Amino acid sequence: MAELDRSKQADVSAFMFMRVNGQSIRPFVSTDASPGMGTQKMSDLTYFNSAGSQDMLKAVAAQIAHMLMVYINTYYTQQRESAFEDKTVPQIVRVFADVLVDPGKTVHDLASTVDKVFRYKNEGSAAVPVAAMTADQPLSAAVKKRLERIGIN
């Protein structure tokens, strides 16, 4: 199964969204102690209720998809290409929700879908701390500690 890639903004976006919204506590990539979030299936995320009806799952997935779209639109506005702008909110929500309702899809699959919708321009600068790490720039001890705590080191 595919791991998330620190140099891909879509991967970092999906990871941070899932983390901030309490969907997963897995680290960014697999470690000896824990598998990475990229390999985590949709059915293992907090929102996914396999005991509920398919209609309920679709409704929750649509809410999560909308929140993901708003999250990306808020935090990554300056880093996207403009091609996504010809898509409507319902179209984007539908594309994300289709992944979110599929129990066999992974967070990596969701990140790949995010990347197809929001074509990121600068793949090497997914987030400021992550970009600094990939560019071998020094990070403060506080930033390093925060990144280690969420599995990015």
Image (cartoon, rainbow, N blue to C red):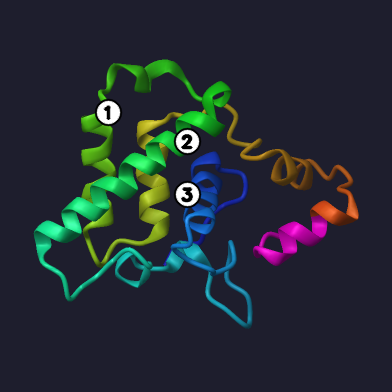
Category of crowding for the residue at label 3, using alpha-carbon neighbours closer than 10 angstroms: few (below 14), some (14–19), many (at least 20) = many
Quadrant position of residue 86: top left
Q: Is residue 145 magenta?
A: yes
Q: Which label number is shown at residue 72?
A: 2
Q: Give 90 or 42, whichever is nearer the viewer.
A: 90
Quadrant position of residue 50: bottom left
- Mark 2 lies on a secondary structure that is helix
Amino acid type, callout 2: Ile
Q: Which label number is shown at residue 14?
A: 3
Q: Is residue 9 magenta?
A: no
Question: Which residue is situated farthest in the bottom direction here?
Answer: 33
Residue drawn 42% across the image and 48% down it: 111
Disc with the residue nearer the chain's start (1 vs 3): 3
- Mark 3 lies on a secondary structure that is helix
Give the x, y percent position of residue 142. Answer: 85, 55
Give the x, y percent position of residue 40. Answer: 41, 68
Residue hosting label 1: 89
Label 1 close to label 3 by CB (< 8 Å)? no
Give the x, y percent position of residue 27. Answer: 59, 67
